[in-house]
Amino acid sequence: MKKKSTLKIFAAVFCIASSHALAKAASVPWPGETSIGSKLMAPLPPSVYDLDPLIVISQNVNEKGLVVMKGNFQKPVTSGDVKVTIKYKDAQNNWVSLWCKTFAGNYEYNEDLTANFELPQSALNTHSVKVELSSDATITNWQSIIWDKTVSHYKQSNYAYANCDLDENQYTILFTPKKTGPFYTTPTELFRV
C-alpha cells in the first residue's frame, strides 16, 4: 500500500513538474532570429557605419593577393572609441574581418594610416571589400571621419614571404627589466658604467 501511494505521489509530482517545464508563453523572436530559430547572426556593436561600403579588387583565380590601403585618416573627438575594420565577402556571402585598428574617442586624429592584409584564394576573379567603422557608443558624427586612401593590390607572384630572424639574446634585453642591482630611471643613470 505504501509503495502504491509513493508511486502515485511521484507520478503526480512528475506530471506537474513536466507540465510546468513544457508550458511557456508564446515568444517574440529576438533580432536576428525567425520563429523557426536563429539565423546565427553575429551581434553588431550599437553603432556601425560603412565608411567605404564596396571596393572591388581584381585578383587571379585560386591565388592569394596582398592589399595595401594607405592614406590620411582624420577623426574628430567622438563620444566613444572608433574601430576601423576592413572586411571581405567570402564564398558564403559573409563579411569576414581582415584588419582592424581602434582609435580613442577622446582624441583627434589626422595622420597617415596604412593597412596591409592578404586576401585569400578564391574561385572568383574579384573580391568585395569594405571599410567599416564601429563603436560601443552611439556616434552621431560618422560623416566627419575620413580616410583619403589609395588601394594597391599585389598578385601572389609579385611578393614573397620573408622570415624575420632576430637574435633573441640581443633584442629581448631591451624589453626585459633588470632583476638584480639598482634600478635606474634617468638617462644619465642608465649610461653609468
Image (cartoon, rainbow, N blue to C red):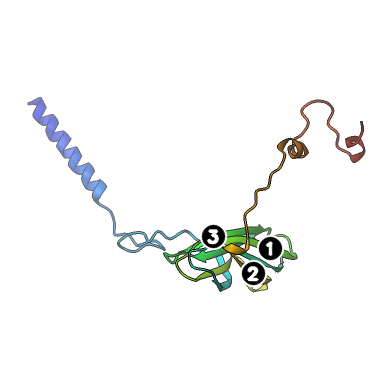
Answer left or right for 156 relative to 43.
Answer: right
Which residue is nearer to you in this view: 107 or 29?
Answer: 107
The image quadrant that residue 92 belongs to is bottom left
Q: CA distance from mark 1 to mark 3?
A: 16 Å
User: Residue lying farthest front?
Assistant: 157
Q: CA distance from mark 3 to mark 2?
A: 18 Å
Q: Amino acid at mark 1?
A: Thr
- Dot 1: few (<14), some (14–19), or many (≥20) neighbours within 10 Å? some
The C terminus lies in which quarter of the figure? top right
Residue wearing tag 3? 97
Disc 1 is placed on an element classified as strand
Residue wearing tag 2? 152
Residue wearing tag 1? 114
Q: Is residue 6 visible?
A: yes
Disc 2 is placed on an element classified as strand
- Dot 2: few (<14), some (14–19), or many (≥20) neighbours within 10 Å? few
| Rendering coords of residue 110 (x, y %) | 75, 66
